[in-house]
Image (cartoon, rainbow, N blue to C red):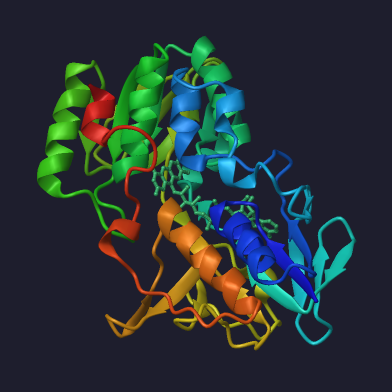
Amino acid sequence: MRYLILGSGPAGIAAAREARRLDKAAEIVVATEEHAAPYLRPALPDLVSGERELPAMANPLAKDLEELGIRLLRGKRARRVDAGGNRVLFTDGTGEGYNFLCIATGARPLAPPALAAVPGFSLVLNSLGDATRLRERAMRSDHTVVFGPGYLGIEAARALRMAGNQVTWISPGPPRTGNPIPPDVEAQIVERLRSKGVKTREGAEIADVIDVDGRSCDVVTTAGETIRCSLVVAAVERFPGVDFLEGSGVKAATGILVSEYLATDVSNIYAAGDCAEVHDILLGKSRINFGWRSAVKQGQLAGGNMAGGGGVYIRNAEDYFGQLLGDSLLERIG
Ligand SMILES: Cc1cc2nc3c(=O)[nH]c(=O)nc-3n(C[C@H](O)[C@H](O)[C@H](O)COP(=O)(O)OP(=O)(O)OC[C@H]3O[C@@H](n4cnc5c(N)ncnc54)[C@H](O)[C@@H]3O)c2cc1C
C-alpha cells in the first residue's frame, strides 16, 4: 500500500503519522512545496519579534518522521492530480503514484492587489521564509504599515512593534471567514496595542501604494488617508488554493468538499486541514475550520480513514484557532 500526502503542515504530518500507526508495512510519502523542515506556523510572529529563534520553530510532531519510515519530499509543488492514473504531477516535471492520497495543502494569503505593484515594499506573513525575511527587513525599517483583519493583523503589529518598528495597523474589519475574536476582547487588545505605541486605523482597505523615492512609499487608504512608511506587511486571511485539482474530479467550493469522514468525491482521495471544507454533521452544512488544532485532528482522521479507520469529524469549539502556544493574545501584548 502507498499513501501519498500533499503538504507538510500539521494536517499532513498528522495524517502520515496516523496512517503509519495503523499500517506498519505501508510506504508513506509526504510531498510538499516547502523547502524548510516542518515548522510551527503559529509561532511565526515570535520569530519576527525576536522572541523565538529558528531552532525553536521546528514542529515537534515531525521530529521522528525518518524513524517512522515516512519519507518527506521537499520542493514538490503539486500541479495536477491525475485521479484516473492515481498519480500527482509536480511543477518540476516529476510525479508520484499512490493507492490513497491525502490533500493537506492548507491555505494561502490573499493580499490586496495594490501590493503587487510595489514588491520591493511589501511582504506577506505566512511561511517560515516570509517571517525570516520580515525579521531581517524589520531591522532596517523604521515605519511599517500592517494590513490585515483580526488575529493575524494583531499578531503582526505586536511582533513588529516588539522588533522596534513604528507600526500603523490598518484593520479592514472582521475576517470574512471563521470565528472572529469577540468584539469586546478585540477592543481591549486594540487599546493595549495603542498603549504600546501602535497606531490603528479601523475599517479601511489599502487603495494604492506609491513608491516615493525608492526607500519609502505612500500607502493610500480607502478612507482617504496617506501613510508614509518603508514597509507594508500583509497579515491577511488565508484561502485554500485548489487550482491544481481542476479536471481531477475532486469537487471544491471555497475549499475541497469532504464528507464527515474527510473523503472527497473520488473514493481514494481525502482532504484535511485548512484546505478542506468539511461537512459538519451537527450544523448540517460544510465549512472550513481554520486553525492548527483542527488541522491536526482532521489530519489524524483522514490518515486513519485512508488506512481503514472509520473516524467521523465532529467539530468542538476549542478546535478553532485557539491560542496554540503560550499565552492568550491579551497576555502576549502585555
Ligand atoms: C502568522 C500565522 C499565525 C497563526 N497563528 C495561529 C494560532 O495561534 N493558532 C491557530 O490555531 N492557528 C494559527 N494559524 C493558522 C494555522 O497555522 C493553520 O490553521 C494551520 O497551519 C493549518 O494547517 P494545514 O496543515 O491545514 O495547512 P498549512 O499549515 O498551511 O500547510 C499546508 C502545506 O502545504 C503546502 N502546499 C500548499 N500547496 C501545495 C501544493 N500545491 N503542493 C505541495 N505542497 C503544497 C504549503 O506550503 C504548506 O507547507 C496561524 C497562521 C499564520 C499564517
Residue 308 location (% of width, % of height): 63, 82
Q: Quadrant of residue 158?
A: top left
User: What is the total number of numbered labels drawn onto the structure image?
Assistant: 0
Q: Can you see residue 291?
A: no
Determine whether, in the image, residue 163 is placed left or right of residue 264.
Answer: left
Residue 1 makes an appearance in the image: yes
In this picture, residue 57 sits left or right of residue 229:
right
- What x and y, as percent, mark residue 6? 69, 62
Q: Is residue 166 above or below residue 97?
A: above
Percent across and percent down for residue 82 are 79, 79
Residue 119: percent from left, percent from top: 59, 33
- Residue at 80% in and 87% down: 84
Q: Residue furthest left?
A: 184
Residue at position x 14%, y 28% in the image: 191
- 288 sits to left or right of 29: left
Judge by depth and name the residue closer to the eye, 207 or 244: 244
Q: Is residue 239 above or below residue 136?
A: below
- Residue 317, compared with residue 327, is above or below; it is below
